[in-house]
Amino acid sequence: MKAQGVAGAGRNAGGIAGVNARASAGANVGANAGALPAGHPATGATPGFGAGAANAARHALPTRRVRVWDLPVRVFHWSLVLATWTALVTGKIGGSLMEVHAKAGLAIVGLVAFRLVWGVIGSAPARFASFAPTPGRVRGYLQGRWHGVGHNPLGALSVFALLGLLGVQATTGLFGNDDIAFTGPLYALVDEAFAGRLGALHQQLANLLIGLIVLHVAAIAFYRHVKKHKLVKPMITGWADIPLSSAAEREGARAVAPQATRRADDASAADAAPARQFARRGGLPAFLVALAIAVGAVWIADGSPWRDTAAPAAASPAATTTPQPAAAPGW
């Protein structure tokens, strides 16, 4: 009896110890649940839900580097940023800086002319046809069905609006006259009253241009901090990191993962040789054509074809003959 009591007490003690051990383990799991990632088996939570789930899942996907912008587009972009801000600041200050304002305006003329030509004969990502905001593309983007790279349809609208406004702004400056400190290089080609109206329009459009630039920068900040899309870095380096699933959808790979992987590998191999891609799409001849047209546009905008550069010929003195004294008679 005494042995049985001891054995029973031992079983009770073992049972109590087991219960306490399980309770302690459960407490530890509960205490550490906050330190575990969402969806961990110990947490019992359902993965994939929450405010940041979409962005977290997007960044968890494997990515590949894609060539987005070629060197001419990147040089054009940052040169246009510098020229535009120089023109705006010097135009607002005025005075002796109006000469710098005029030079910045001529630079904008050349840059816009280059981009218009490069958007037709340049590399494939730079061509306007590759990102033109057609109604179908805009509708697909608003419905969440757009998975391209580079300018999205709304960004493309901003690009075309800025290029168009800069072109009009530069043109009004070329012919404008404010009767104070500035006269456009092509002022003499138009009527004086019309030149005055163009000068007034030039000043008014500057405010609209500032508004578009602010909206453009705000959109870049929104995409960077809210949608977690880096738009500035690709415009510096030319490369963007694209989630593999989005790249597969963009290339039409809807079937099985191995097919998407093979297509992604093929695209990566193509992007690994940007020099060959640039030579195949655009190339040096197209670049030289665009550059020549840009230089010609600046030459015309500066009024060089109509400027009389020939120095007036100095009037040559009338040839005078000094009368020879009459010969003394021999007699």
Image: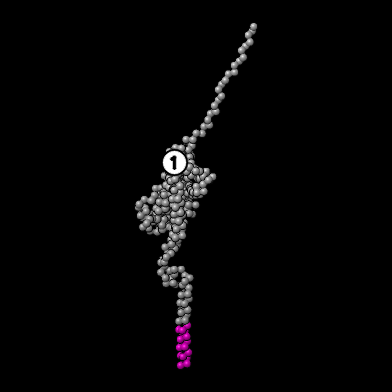
Relative placement, left or right, of 316 versus 148 is right
322 and 244: which one is in front? 322
Question: Does residue 5 belong to the magenta stretch?
Answer: yes
Residue at the image point whose x is 41% and y is 47% from the top: 128
Local crowd size for mark 1, using a 10 Å CA cut-off: few (<14), some (14–19), many (≥20): many
The magenta-colored residue range is 1-17
Residue sitting farthest toward the right = 331
Residue at the image point whose x is 45% and y is 84% from the top: 15
Report x, y in % for residue 139.
35, 55
SS at badge 1 = helix
Q: Which residue is mark 1?
A: 195
Query: Quick check: 226 above or below 91?
Result: below
Instruction: Give the overall secondary structure of the magenta segment.
Output: helix
Disc 1 residue type (three-letter): Ala
Relative placement, left or right, of 117 versus 328 is left
Residue 138 in sight in this render: yes
Residue at the image point whose x is 46% and y is 57% from the top: 221
